[in-house]
Amino acid sequence: MNQTKLKLPIKMGYGLAETGITAVQLFTQIYLLKYYTEIIGLNSSLAGIALSISVIWDAVSDPLMGRISDHTHTKWGRRRPYILLGGILLSLAVLLLFSPPHLTTQIGKFSYLLSVYLFVNTAMTIISVPHIALGGELSFERNERTSVFGWRLFFSNIGMLIGMIVPAAILQTLGDEFSKENIILSRTTAGEIVSLVILLSSIITFLVTKGKDQTEEKPEQKIPFFKAFISVLKNKMFLILLFAFIIATIGRTFNSAIALYYYEYRLGLKESLVVINILLPFFLVLLLSIGFWVWIAKKIGKKIPAFLGVFGLGVLTVIVYPLFPYGELRPPLIAAFVGGICAGSILIMDSILTDVVDYDEFKTGEKREGLYFGIWKMGVKFSQAFGIAITGFLLDMIGFQNGAVTQSEEVGFRLAIIFGPGVGFFFILGSLLFLFFPLSDTKHMQVQRILLKRNKKRSKV
């Protein structure tokens, strides 16, 4: 167990891969549905089905990938080879996703989106599950772990900025933001840039973490996958944390998928204006808030800050978004600043999961970071699939007209209800469920002391 403090370049190098991972995630979450429905011409419901099927596959494959990396033994480590392989595959997949061939039928468009997005999500699983599991293994010291995941969140938000701003900035430089040709060119070019980011960031992380990805000299006897899977799901402590995060993630998915629709058809704001003047400040504030959340978690523990951050974000979302006046930037900009501060608390959730893994090792004697983080990712992906699928159907239900330059006031109001109370409800519900999480900071420190003594005894044998 690594109890020493990690050097800053190691923590930064580890977190860097999250730049590419998150750039792909946000690029697809914000732009993909709108691109395929309004530009490629795919029916909203069919698009929602294609995206949700792909994400469900991604979710199912996550625990399997975690299990595979748990039992991988190579001279490069057990997590790092997959970070490199996944980065290469994901780089290629993104290029294909936003460069579809000319297709004339709905079944052709549906099939292409489904097959390529399946490729994207498979590659995402290969890189993201081993990467997040490696973060929990870099250090055994609880505050160092919070710092590691703080850097991971920092680079995640750099990735968010790239995935969010690059497509809008390119479109703005092309002139007419409503031109179909300009939109296609902006998305294709942005796909090439995001592809390069994921490739370079994964290679750097692979190189910088050399020697930090430890493989057991004597592989433990493998418990059958499904038996291990079920045993993890019997961990009530883990389930509370997982379901709280899943519920909040449904809200986050709604938020990402509906955002551009809300700002354009409810508030009358152009895409580039929204991205640069609202979304960019939100993520910059989020970045700056990370240090605050790391500091407060060290001072008063992890549970209360995590609850207050997510709960505050939910209350803000419920109240303000249906009330913003048409055509004005200042009110949503103020909300972006407050929301960015609250959203920074999300880093604490990943750090708390490493505490749960410690507790599992204390109870079972096994190290199963990959399986735990794989199931964690699976739950998140299922919630994303649900959010994406429902978004497509909701657009049809509220009377949204695909390809129309303007929408009715009634449609705009319905978008505001989804984007405000609809999203905020999930944030609030997830935070309230999290209050039942039973592992206190004091109890976790006791668990760590026992694990340290146990491993010292093993090392002497």
Image: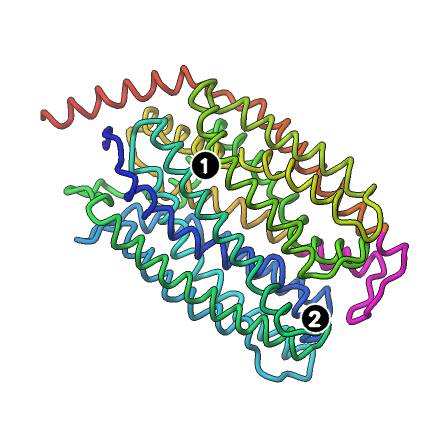
Residue 305 in the image, given as x and y percentages of width and height: 54, 25
User: Dividing the image into 4 quarters, which one contains the C terminus?
Assistant: top left
Residue neighbourhood size for the residue with mark 1, other residues' Cα within 10 Å, grouped as few (<14), some (14–19), many (≥20): many
State left or right for residue 197 relative to residue 203: right
| Residue 452 is a magenta residue | no
The tally of labels here is: 2
Closest to the observer: 48 or 408? 408
State left or right for residue 96 relative to residue 373: right
- Residue 177's mark? 2
Indicate the secondary structure of the residue bearing disc 2: loop
Residue 455 in the image, given as x and y percentages of width and height: 20, 26
**The residue stretch that appears in magenta:** 389-412
Q: Amino acid at mark 2?
A: Glu
- Residue 42's mark? none
Quarter residue 47 falls in? bottom right
Badge 1 is on which residue? 350
- Distance (Cα) linking label 2 and label 1: 38 Å
